[in-house]
Amino acid sequence: MKKNLFEIGAKFEDGWSSDNRVKKELKAKEIKEPKSHRLYFAKERRRGKIVTIIKPFFLDNKELKALLKKLKSTLSSGGTIKSDAIELQGEVEAKAKEVLTKEGFRFK
């Protein structure tokens, strides 16, 4: 008779995970100066509203949060950070490009 693979208290030594919601560790990203960034914009429609996505950022988490805060207050819109991208509510590409250019970022 074969041993049950999944039992209460089973050890998952062969790479199996009991929780499929565990996030995989992200590779460490290199941190670059703003002038060496090559950012681009993307727009998506979510639930009938437009979201402006700016990526890829190679900044420290603390610096990225500070940049998001500055963008949100300057543009008077909401936003969030998702991995290496900033998502802003609304169609704010022109204004965001203006603010980021003043900060020293470059675009494709």
Image (cartoon, rainbow, N blue to C red):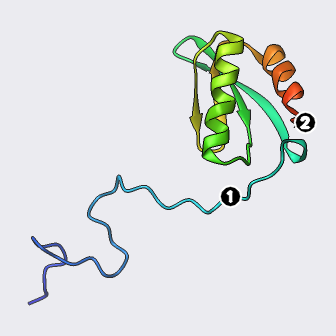
- Any part of residue 51 in sight: no
The residue lying toward the viewer, choosing from 4 and 104, is 104
Quick check: 86 above or below 5? above
Please provide percent x and percent y for residue 52: 69, 22
Give the image quarter of residue 84.
top right
User: Exactly how many numbered labels are in the figure?
Assistant: 2
- Residue 20 numbered mark, or none: none
Q: Are marks 2 and 1 in contact (CB under 8 Å)?
A: no
- Any part of residue 106 in sight: yes
Q: Residue at x 29, y 58 (%)?
A: 19
- Horizontally, residue 9 falls left or right of residue 93, namely left
Quick check: 47 above or below 58? above
Quick check: 63 above or below 11? above
Quick check: 90 above or below 103? above
Please provide percent x and percent y for residue 6: 17, 72
Amino acid type at circle 2 is Arg
Q: Secondary structure at mark 1?
A: loop
Q: Residue at x 71, y 14 (%)?
A: 74
Reading the image, the residue beneath label 1 is 29
Give the image quarter of residue 99.
top right
- Residue 106 numbered mark, or none: 2
Q: Residue at x 56, y 11 (%)?
A: 48
Amino acid type at circle 1 is Lys
Alpha carbon distance from label 2 to label 1: 19 Å
Nearer-N-terminus badge (2/1) = 1
Please provide percent x and percent y for residue 108: 91, 37
Q: Quadrant of the N terminus?
A: bottom left
